[in-house]
Amino acid sequence: MDTDNSVNGLDGLRENDKEVDTYVGIVVVPESDNGSHHRSKLLFLRFEEDVPRDDAFIEFLVDSIVSYAIPKKKRLAAIARASGSRTGADMRPLARLQREGRRLFLEYDPNNIGRFGEVGELIAYCVAERHLGAAQIAAKLSLKTNSNMPVHGIDGIHAKFENGVMNVFLLESKLAPSANDGAKEFAVSTASFSSNRAQYLRELTIVTDFSNLDALPQEQKDVFLSYFDMYDSQSVLQKRDRHVGFICYDEKLYAKGIPVDDTKPPSIHEDNFVERYAKQHKHHDDALLKHLGNNNVKPFKSMAFFIAVPSVDELRRKFGEALK
């Protein structure tokens, strides 16, 4: 059987939605810098002229809730019910999924905003599908039995199958006041998870028992699951695990814009931001490597996306209010 990354395999579980590029940009590092900036990438909240697109980004995240939180098999069943209705366009099954997805998130408490970090996990999902090219194989949020309790363990499990190798990405999202703080938190979490085999095996159990792989034909599902069988399969020897951090942090450059100038294109504001932001790449990368080293984490088995936003607390607040 051809289990390579095809539309009928793992890649068929990934939306590959490039719409995220409208809201989140990526800094292209010059080729000459690749050697020094090889463990991190710089992302940022894009601009609509001189204004960051945080409101539009929040709307995009809310629209992504069902794909993130509800397993694909259940989504396909709702679509089938909608299209199989008398008119072929009954939207109630889809509306119910949206309501169900919203209820899985923590209840937003404006007096305890620091506890509301699940928006970071949703951002990690969107960025991972787009920039890692890896499908979510475990919709962990759907496993909640109490919406007022966070999901424990790592924040997401994504994978892609290439050249006979199962590449598994273990996601950690961090909302931090600075890039350095976020890098430190990611390194500490990665070290803790890496040293806890029992936790690792529990995450593999989620993949095998409660994963999006259920949406695949049984033959494909069995082949892919063999890569997660730690005891009775040779396929597990061809599995590669990588820890990936998604570090949203407060970037002060957003408060240091340039004047509006009608003689120039609106893009000058984003271009100005990117030019200055790119100069921080080595600093962020060095901070990441330092904290990984301090926590005895192998740097080449980890990477991070630094995602600059004007304010992580405002991101929390706006997402929490949008959920209501």
Image (cartoon, rainbow, N blue to C red):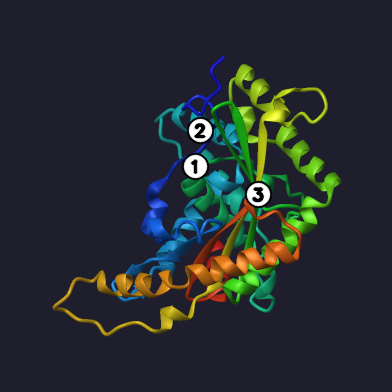
The residue carrying mark 1 is 133
The C terminus - image quarter:
bottom right
Provide residue 211's location: percent of width, then percent of height. 67, 35
Residue nearer the viewer, 94 or 230: 230
Q: Is residue 320 visible?
A: no
Give the Cα distance between marks 2 and 3.
Answer: 22 Å
Q: Which mark is residue 301?
A: 3
The residue carrying mark 2 is 11
Residue at image position (55%, 69%) is 284
Side of 21 relative to 169 (left or right): left
Could you tell me residue 152's position as x and y percent?
76, 54
Tell which circle, 2 or 1, labels the residue nearer the N-terminal end: 2
The amino acid type of the residue labelled 2 equals: Asp
- Residue contact between numbered discs 2 and 1, judged by CB atoms under 8 Å: yes
Q: Secondary structure at mark 1?
A: loop
Q: Residue furthest left?
A: 263
**Mark 3 crowdedness (10 Å alpha carbons): few <14, some 14-19, many ≥20:** few
